[in-house]
Amino acid sequence: MFTGIVEEMGTIQAIRRGRSSAVLEIQAESVLSDVHIGDSIAVNGVCLTVTSFSAQGFTADVMHETLDRSSLSRLKGGSRVNLERAMAADGRFGGHIVAGHVDGVGTVTALRRDDNAIWYTIQAGPEILRYVVEKGSITIDGISLTVAAVDDKSFQISAIPHTVAVTVLQDRKPGDIVNLETDIIGKYVEKLLTAPRAAEKPQSNLTREFLTRYGF
């Protein structure tokens, strides 16, 4: 589990592409301080498993499903990426519950400065927007952000200068594709409310008369 508080920006050093998968080589610093093979690190919001590491970075496999559902397929050498290690049990919960399982992608359609903030408008499909609520949480490229406005075609977030400066939001411009993960709580609530009820248990034929007849 992650919180959407980006620890550092890494750099894609190389991408080894297979027929429908890829291996990412990512240069990093902070997230390597206690890294082990098998650890989870969110890369632009996508939970990936460390398969090897060195003093300069780490590698992670990306499977076909992940490439299809995220923007990782668009990365290239030199691309900067947001990095966050899985949350420690004694860590601060600074953002919101982030699974690292991207729901899909959106497109940046507009940027607007508002005094010390920057507004980003993100266009997304109805399958994502149904879970986006004003003042709710959403993860964009692994960053925990608050939804400022939403309609039937897009939503907006307002980012402070610090957030832009320490994440790949500073690289995003209209037309760019971003990874989106909606609030996991809303999805679970919907599942529980819409799941078909379990079949009613058959009524028992055990009656008082039956018990009396057989000496109970």
Image (tube, rainbow, N blue to C red):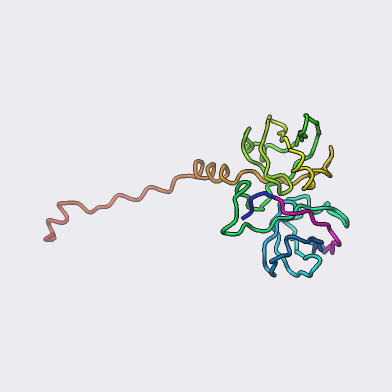
Judging depth in this view, the residue of 47 and 161 nearest the camera is: 161
**Does the magenta run of residues contain 12?**
yes
Q: Quadrant of the N terminus?
A: bottom right
Vertical order, 104 against 108 (above or below): below
Q: Picture coordinates of residue 21 (x, y %)?
A: 78, 61
**Residue at position x 78%, y 50% in the image:** 71
Q: Quadrant of the C terminus?
A: bottom left
Q: Which residues are magenta?
A: 6-17
Q: How many marks?
A: 0
Judging depth in this view, the residue of 155 and 26 nearest the camera is: 26
Judging depth in this view, the residue of 42 and 66 nearest the camera is: 42
- In which quadrant of the rendered view does residue 88 lie? bottom right
**Residue at position x 61%, y 44% in the image:** 183
**Does the magenta run of residues contain 15?**
yes
Vertical order, 110 against 21 (above or below): above
**Residue at position x 56%, y 45% in the image:** 185
Q: Picture coordinates of residue 61 (x, y %)?
A: 75, 64
Main secondary structure found in the magenta portion: strand
Q: Picture coordinates of residue 179 (x, y %)?
A: 74, 47
Left or right: where does residue 18 sit relative to residue 34? right
Q: Picture coordinates of residue 99 (x, y %)?
A: 63, 52
Vertical order, 69 against 15 (above or below): above
Left or right: where does residue 58 sit relative to residue 127? right
